[in-house]
Image (cartoon, rainbow, N blue to C red):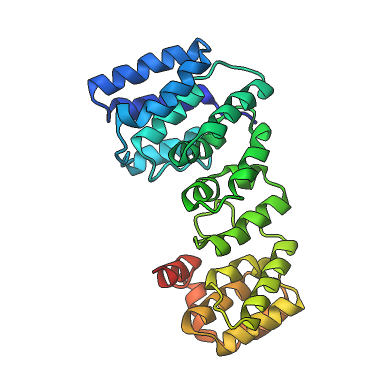
């Protein structure tokens, strides 16, 4: 289903109106008018000039504004966005209504010439654009990059992958977090999109790390618990027995996500961790806080 771009634009305009000085606000309104007329060259020029005209300060959205974002476009969380990123999103949303192929052609031009800041803004804006299914290949391209800022613009706090990616694309993105060195917890829909193939891929990856005597990020087990097979359960039991404190906690959390009776039997050996999971004092957020540098 297409996002309600008019409501999203109205919300963005209200945020910018409270944060831009008169000259910057006038520039945005003028450039919006140019874009609405279908002036592609005007769009490309304005998109590149946005940081110089409006600045790069953080939006600093308050809780009420973030709640409004989620109500206007479920899953949208612009926490941490900057003024220039929001301005660029508004410019993209101001493109006149067009068929999906036309919109993709305009975006291809911008992506092809974009520097890192522009790419980040565009990937962040994907869930707000019309014709969502038309942008899957573009989003999949974003997760193949080794530029952390660009990868995270797709993978973190972005509802688009969970809604549009195939399992293969989703699994590639989740595993890429480990290779590129970013956390998995900001991925929207991480637990909901868990699947047996991803669980098996993670277990294979863990065995490779163990064979090379390299550490395993504790949050990786989060992708295993829901679909843990006998091999995965054996590995989790091993970690629960001989791992570090945070590794044992992660293994316990993963086991608690499994519906297999074997998992329940394994957890009987750690009643203290089971109690912490039950009362909410041990969660994946706990693991993130301990594991983060």
Tag count: 0
Quadrant placement of the N terminus: top right
Q: Residue 262 lies in what quarter of the image?
A: bottom right
- Decide: is 214 above or below 224: below
Expressed as whole percent of the image width and height from the top left, the position of residue 60 reads: 31, 42
Query: What residue do we see at 43% from left, 39% from top?
Result: 117
Residue 22 on image: x %, y %:
23, 20
- Left or right, residue 96 beside residue 136: left
Residue at the extreme top of the image, as rendered? 37
222 on left or right of 34: right
Horizontal and vertical percent for residue 143? 60, 49
Front in this rendered view, residue 187 or 63 = 187
Q: In percent of the image, x 57 and y 50: which residue is there?
A: 145
**Vertical relation: 189 (above or below) 78:** below
Q: In front: 151, or 193?
A: 151
Residue 47's spot in the image, x, y percent? 44, 26
At x 48%, y 78%, the residue is: 246
Q: Is residue 244 left or right of residue 102?
A: left
Q: Is residue 229 above or below residue 146?
A: below
Split into 4 quadrants, where in the image is the C terminus? bottom left
Give whichever of 50, 219 is nearer the camera: 50
Q: Residue at x 37, y 33 (%)?
A: 84
- Residue 260 appears in view: yes
The reply to whether residue 7 is in sight is no
């Amino acid at each position: 289903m297409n996002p309600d771009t008019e409501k999203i634009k109205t919300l963005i305009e209200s945020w910018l109106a409270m944060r831009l000085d008169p000259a910057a606000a006038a520039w945005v309104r003028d450039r919006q008018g140019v874009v609405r007329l279908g002036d592609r060259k005007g769009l490309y020029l304005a998109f590149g000039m946005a940081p110089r005209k409006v600045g790069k300060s953080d939006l600093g959205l308050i809780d009420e504004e973030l709640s409004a974002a989620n109500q206007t476009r479920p899953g949208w969380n612009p926490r941490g966005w900057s003024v220039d990123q929001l301005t660029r999103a508004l410019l993209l949303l101001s493109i006149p209504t067009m068929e999906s192929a036309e919109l993709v052609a305009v975006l291809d031009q911008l992506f092809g010439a974009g520097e890192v800041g522009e790419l980040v803004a565009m990937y962040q804006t994907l869930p707000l654009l019309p014709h969502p299914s038309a942008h899957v290949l573009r989003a999949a391209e974003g997760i193949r990059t080794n530029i952390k800022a660009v990868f995270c613009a797709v993978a973190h706090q972005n509802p688009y992958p969970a809604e549009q990616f195939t399992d293969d694309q989703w699994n590639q993105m989740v595993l890429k977090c480990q290779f590129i060195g970013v956390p998995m917890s900001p991925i929207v829909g991480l637990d909901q999109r868990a699947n047996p193939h991803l669980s098996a891929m993670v277990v294979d990856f863990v065995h490779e790390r163990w064979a090379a005597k390299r550490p395993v990020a504790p949050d990786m087990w989060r992708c295993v618990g829901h679909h843990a097979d006998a091999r995965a359960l054996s590995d989790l039991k091993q970690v629960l027995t001989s791992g570090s404190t945070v590794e044992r906690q992660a293994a316990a959390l993963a086991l608690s996500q499994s519906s297999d009776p074997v998992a329940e039997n394994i957890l009987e050996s750690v009643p203290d961790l089971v109690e912490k999971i039950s009362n909410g004092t041990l969660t994946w957020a706990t693991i993130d806080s301990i594991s983060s540098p």
